[in-house]
Image (cartoon, rainbow, N blue to C red):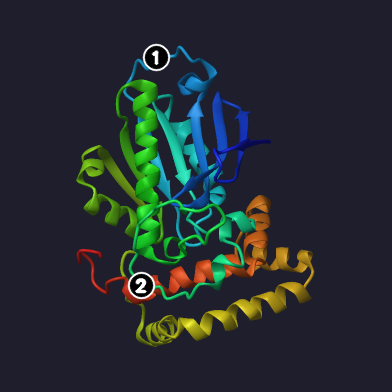
Amino acid sequence: MIDESDGGSGDRTYEESIIGDGLVVNSDRKHICGWPTDTVTIDHVEEDVSLDKNAARTDARTLILFVPGNPGVVHWYTNLLTEIVKQLGKRFAARGISYAGHGVGEDVVGTKHDHSQSFDADDQLGNKCEEPKVKGSLRDMRVAWTMDGQIEHKIKWIDDLLEEEQQKYESSPGIVFLSHSIGAHFVQCILLRRPDILAKTGHIIHLTPFVRFDPPPLKKIFLSSSAHSYKYAIPMIVNLVGVLSSSMSQNWIDAILEKAGGIKCTNGRKIALEIFSNPDMMRNHLVLGSQEVRDLPEHPNVRPK
């Protein structure tokens, strides 16, 4: 693990591990739209130009861009992405990103001062994806708390990736989008807003996509009511989870996540325990989720906002 300076906007953490079958998996924490954000890159060794500064690409390169569901923690999906790149071969690489405000640590989820802002997810973003003008100033929580903010956050990530690829290879890669749950809606919105990204996209693959909200009537009434009263419901839920997590042993919580939550991966349960024991992370997850329920269309093929 190496701590590096990121030019004044805080510390960033970089980790590299070379695994079997000639793959390189990098985890990096980058500042995107003012938010320290966890990212993952997966390359075949021969395609990783950091290993050979004089390396030249001889074949067309395709990037798999992964956008997760909510909670948007990319490290839950690293093993999946690694296996995909392994199976597809040397012309493919993968890039994944967490959501703004989703992860482990105060620098990721926001400080107590950041969370002192009113979480009115109906506000429109003002200056989208701008870094704080003054060091130590409040981050714009609307980037973390709204779908519009998260979409702009992913667009900035993609723009940075494509610029990096252009500088390394003097050409743009092909793109395959891979998404999970509400990430499918984000990808749709990205491609509607940015025809230039759409033009580079060869395939779009959604895993259990959440692109419309139309559950059975009773469930719909309950979820819609909770989502519309989120300013009152979310503090209650956060406090309840805090009481439960502090009164139960980690072994008990781990067992619940495995048996009831269906999380079989030990590392996945560790990540879940860390993020859901943080009330600020829980708040970010729930505020964003409540807007998903309120604002997703009920019918398919409706142009998203």
- Front one among 78 and 35: 35
Residue 272 falls in which quadrant of the image? bottom right
Q: Secondary structure at mark 1?
A: loop
Instruction: Please give the label number shown on residue 65.
Output: none
- Front one among 266 and 41: 41
- Looking at marks 1 and 2 on the same chain, the residue that comes earlier in the sequence is marked by 1
Res. 111 visible in picture: yes
Residue denoted by label 2: 123
Residue 176 image point, x, y percent = 33, 40
Residue at image point 44% right, 37% down: 94
Q: Amino acid at mark 2?
A: Asp
Give the left or right position of residue 271, taking residue 59 as reference.
Answer: right
Residue placed furthest toward the front: 134
Residue 172 image point, x, y percent = 30, 29
**Residue 185 against residue 19 in the figure, above or below:** below
**Residue 57 against residue 288 in the figure, above or below:** above
Q: Secondary structure at mark 2?
A: loop
Residue denoted by label 1: 56
Q: Amino acid at mark 1?
A: Ala
Give the left or right position of residue 186, taking residue 29 as reference.
Answer: left
Residue at image point 67% right, 67% down: 277
Residue at image point 35% right, 35% down: 162
Residue 128 falls in which quadrant of the image? bottom left
